[in-house]
Amino acid sequence: MIFDAARAAARQLFSPPFRSALYKSLGLTLLILAGLWVALKELFEAFALPWLEALMPGLPAWAGWLGLLAAIVAGIGLALALALLIAPVTAIVAGIFLDDVAEAVERQSYPQDPPGVAVPLLRGIVLSLKFFGVVVLGNMVALLLLLVPGVNLIAFFVVNAYLLSREFFEFAAMRFRTEAEAKALRRRHSATVFLAGFVISAFLSVPLLNLLTPLFAAAMMVHLYKMISAREERRDRIAAAAATGDV
């Protein structure tokens, strides 16, 4: 089920019905990341650079290479910070374009089903901001755990698998159910949803491809929601038939 949903989402990423959402999602993701890069650079220059420059006058002439080393380390640190911010950026972009992606998936793959209803704008903004905050905190924890040998990469995958799978699945489910019902459905199938999150984490870890994470994750979770709902409906029909003696 998980791999079926992932394959279906991957096939649809560059299909004509997805192109509008693809261009808008990719453009906004790049714009936000560029803004974050500038902000991080400004913060470094405002706080870390004066401290380094204050140390330099007291160093012997032969130690000038330390300035170059510091610049290289700073560049690597900024790049790492930006990489860790891709997941929170995904949260914001998803909140804006998830309904566009979901509608494209539903029209293309489930034309016989009733279409979903978009989450009200104000509620969607609140949920997106909440999601953003949770993902930022989760990735800050993952960043601290990067210093722990044997835990670092595992922490990144586990944190993002849990957070992204939970929120993307609930967003998809809320097009057809109330928020409480969507959360209950996710809890009933928590293992499946969590394991699906590792596919999203793997996608998120691939440079350049990870810029399409909002589109891929949204499409995948719509497919997964549809599959889980269909399985529950079949189970309920069988149970109802058994209760009435029709089997």
Image: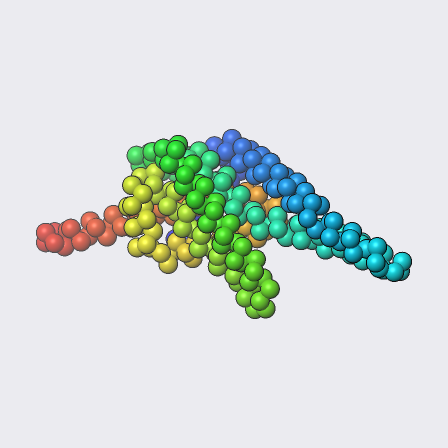
Q: Is residue 36 left or right of residue 107?
A: right
Does the rendering let one see residue 19? no
Q: Specify the quadrant that holds the C terminus.
A: bottom left
Q: Nearer the viewer, residue 184 or 9?
A: 184
Residue at image x 57%, y 43%?
Answer: 211
Q: Compared to 197, does 211 lie above or below?
A: above
Position of 112 compared to 80: left or right? left
**Residue found farthest to the bottom:** 150
Where is residue 139? Give x, y as percent: 52, 54
**Residue depicted at x 53% and y 36%:** 25
Could you tell whether 228 is left or right of 91 in the image? left
Q: Residue at x 34, y 33 (%)?
A: 117
Residue 17 image point, x, y percent? 47, 32
Tell me if residue 105 comes above or below residue 48 in the rendering: above
Q: How many numbered marks does the figure carry? A: 0
- Residue 46: tell me if it is visible: yes
Figure check: 47 above or below 107:
below
Residue 51: image location, x then y, percent: 73, 52
- The residue furthest right is 61
